[in-house]
Image (cartoon, helix red, strand yellow):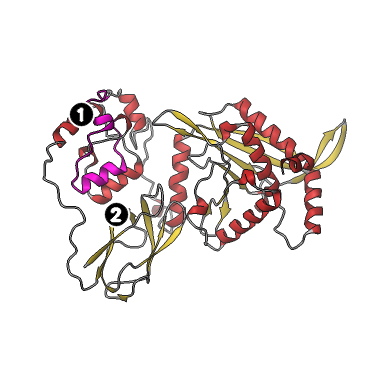
Amino acid sequence: MFEFKLPDLGEGIHEAEILKWHVKAGDRIQSDDPLVDVQTDKATVTIPSPRTGIIAQLNGKEGDTLVVGQVVLVIDDGVGAQAPAVAPAPAAPPAAPALVAAAAPVEVAGPVPAAPATRRMARELGVDINRVPPTGLGGRVTAEDVKRFAEGGAAPVSGALAPAATPARVMPPAEVAAGAAGRIPYLDIEPLPDFEAEGPVERVPLRGIRRKVARKMTTSAILVPHVAHMDEADVTELDAFRKREREKQKDGPPLTLLVFVMKAVVAGLKAAPSFNASVDPFKEEIVYKHYYNIGIAADSGRGLVVPVVHNAGCKSIRNLASDIDDLARRAREDKLTVKEMRGGTFTITNIGPLGGTAMVPIINYPEVAILGMGRAQQKPVVRDGQIVIRLMLPLTLAFDHRVADGADAARFVTALARQISDPNLLLLES
């Protein structure tokens, strides 16, 4: 028997949701036959079979979540019982009492600090997270700690738990409450009312991309102090230039307003690095990124995805147009790879083609800013004391108040509006 475990699906991905089984118990399969479609935080992946044999057991149904290292299914490959990958450790490793004692000062003030994904992994593996010796900063339990404990291994005597290290600081109750998953003051999720008592309803499981979006947006909305700055850009000249260029090269990628806005955004980020950063809450550091990978929010038909234009700072307007067109098309066809949805430093969301005068977008965590584009419309505006009709584009910059202030946002958006109002300034950037 061969126990097939969920493999490592890429950096930072610890779990995957079962979308669709391609096999059932009793099926005979060949090596490389598709086994199951899973949905990660980044993309949909089809996992092939590593062995030839007969499906003996499926571990999970569609909609269930598996963690990396968990048994997905069992294949009868005619070899016999599979030996465990890690020999069971003694029930009480000699180092365990000392390690637990070292962690105790952190635990006494409240629940063990751990990320939601780490707690979920502990539940899936049947591990009591309160018994796991932590190795993370400030006594935080990491995903590696949980996996090591589940396999019967002892935590390494190093870092914060090494005997020679500085004793763990006793965290005050308020700090533990803020750092521990699920302990947000005054947040009390009440049960829903009985909707069925009022009339007929339909219940649909929250799965796939919709569930991933729900988790990520909740994380962003709770953890990040959002502020929004709004303005309008006069894109009359830019739109005329865009249409002239489109007529000259009809067989090329479409030159949309989004292409020019992305070019201007990169220039703006170079001048305002605070918006091209991330906050490390555990080290209390701001991570400034000196590269520019711009995500574009796209409607895939199955939900919101954010493919990334990598190295946007090194590309011409036509190169950006080609990349955006390709990513948007493959997003609709559900053909994006994990790599193409990873590594973003700033996101642009454009609801203009769908309508709407403005929007307040939620930051794509762990980024610190997102630009929302509304619908460009002709409006009467005052120019040199005269009322004229101009094409105005609404812009909203939502940003993390931990890394930037309102004045920073005002300068960023003003410079952005100035650039996309004058095609010559954008050509200089090219």
Kind of residue at disc 2: Gly
Residue placed furthest toward the bottom: 28
Give the prevailing secondary structure in the magenta stretch: loop
As drawn, the label of residue 69 is 2
Q: Which residues are magenta?
A: 139-168
Left or right? Give the position of 255 relative to 226. right
**Whether residue 62 can be seen here:** yes
Q: CA distance from mark 1 to mark 2?
A: 28 Å
Relative to the observer, which residue lies in front, 73 or 156?
A: 156
Inspect the magenta stretch and tell me whether residue 154 lies in it: yes
Q: Quadrant of the C terminus?
A: top right
Whether residue 359 is visible to the viewer of this picture, yes or no, is no
Q: State yes or no: residue 270 in magenta.
A: no
**173 and 54: which one is in front?**
54
Residue 94 x/y as whole percent: 12, 37
* Image x and y of residue 68, in percent: 32, 53
Up-down relation of residue 92 to residue 165 (above or below):
below
Which quadrant holds residue 383? top right
Front-most of residues 83 and 295: 83
Q: Position of residue 409 (x, y in %)?
A: 62, 30
Query: Regarding mark 1 in the picture, which secondary structure is present there?
Result: helix
Name the residue nearer the viewer: 161 or 134.
Answer: 161
Q: Quadrant of residue 230?
A: top right
Q: In the structure shown, which secondary structural element does the residue marked by tag 2 occupy?
A: loop
Quadrant in which the N terminus is drawn = bottom left
Residue carrying label 1: 102
Horizontally, is 356 left or right of 115 in the view?
Answer: right
Q: Position of residue 362 (x, y in %)?
A: 53, 41
- How many neighbours does mark 1 have within 10 angstroms: few (below 14), some (14-19), or many (20 or more)? many
